[in-house]
Amino acid sequence: MSLKLLSQRAGMEPSKAHLYLVSFCNLGLVRQEDSGYYALGSYALQLGLAALNKIDLAHLARKVLHELRDETGEAVSLAVHGDKGPVIVAKADGLKDDPLVIRLGRTLRVSNSAAGRIFLTYSDADSVRRLLEAEIARGEVTAAGVKKLKQDVREHGYARADALAHAGFSSLAAPVFDHEGRLAGAITLLGLSANFPASAEGHLSQVLMSKTRQLSFELGFRD
């Protein structure tokens, strides 16, 4: 940006803004290019990378999980990449009297769970590929079925699974992306199938995706 534009955005006189920029350049927070325009410097990059390396997704997600639980009343969980596939690392139990227990540390199937379908669609991890190959070999899903699942997730922005991983229950899951646009995890709403009718799916999915977009933004993702 030019000095003129920077001073306008900062709401100060150009002469005063210039003094700040000189100091920032000396610190490495800002650099002045040959064109005369100013850009972020190497130290600003180091600070940004240090902040990104300190991000704990499970810690950041806890607030979002409880907000989702309080707003919907349903159980909520976060799954991230694990050595053997997507694994649940955080949860918020539902407010309704559902006979459901979400177990931390549980590894999810990739074709028959909503969160698994998010990983199936957006992840290129070897663990996800191996899980999918095993599920195809067992006849749990076909290659054509996988293609359709991925198309549906990309079209809608979220995944749904009905009475697959938990009989009588349905789930909706949406992706969380990191600063490089890679899949960082998936957040799932889970409850009785009666609580997830087609008439309510639109609202629930919008609430869910709003929270996952918020969390992705906090991780540095810019769509």
Image: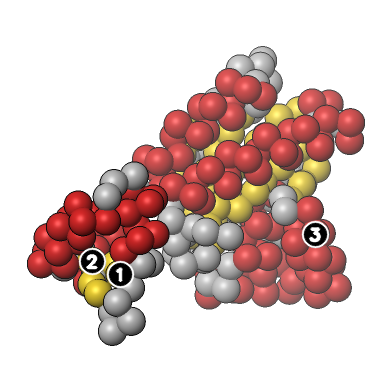
Task: Please give the label number shown on residue 128.
Answer: none
Q: Residue at x 58, y 60 (%)?
A: 223
Q: Residue at x 52, y 33 (%)?
A: 65
Going from N to C along the chain, the mark reached first, 2 or 3, is 2
| Depth order, front residue of 139/171 | 171
Where is residue 31 shown, x and y percent of the image?
Answer: 23, 72
Give above or below for 61 relative to 139: above
Whether residue 50 is situated above or below residue 212 in the rendered picture:
below
Q: Amino acid at mark 2?
A: Val
Name the kind of residue labelled 1 in the image.
Tyr
The answer to whether the residues at label 3 and label 1 have Cβ atoms under 8 Å apart is no
Residue 51 shows in the view = no
Residue that mark 1 sits on: 38
Q: Are marks 1 and 2 in contact (CB under 8 Å)?
A: yes
Q: Nearer the viewer, mark 1 or mark 2?
A: 1
Callout 1: helix, strand or loop?
strand
- 3 vs 1, front mark: 1
Q: Earlier in the sequence, mark 1 or mark 2?
A: 2
Q: Is residue 152 left or right of residue 134?
A: right
The correct choice, above or below, for 157 with respect to 170 in the image is: below
Q: Label 2, on which residue?
A: 30
Query: Disc count in the image?
Result: 3
- Which labelled disc corresponds to residue 155? 3
Relative to the observer, which residue lies in front, 203 or 162? 203
Is 31 on the left or on the right of 214, as rendered? left
Crowding near the residue tagged with mark 1, few <14, some 14–19, many ≥20 C-alpha atoms within 10 Å: some
Q: Is residue 114 visible?
A: yes
Determine whether the residue tagged by mark 2 lies in a helix, strand or loop: strand
- Of labels 3 and 1, earlier in sequence is 1
Which residue is found at the position 57% from the left and 73% from the top? 124
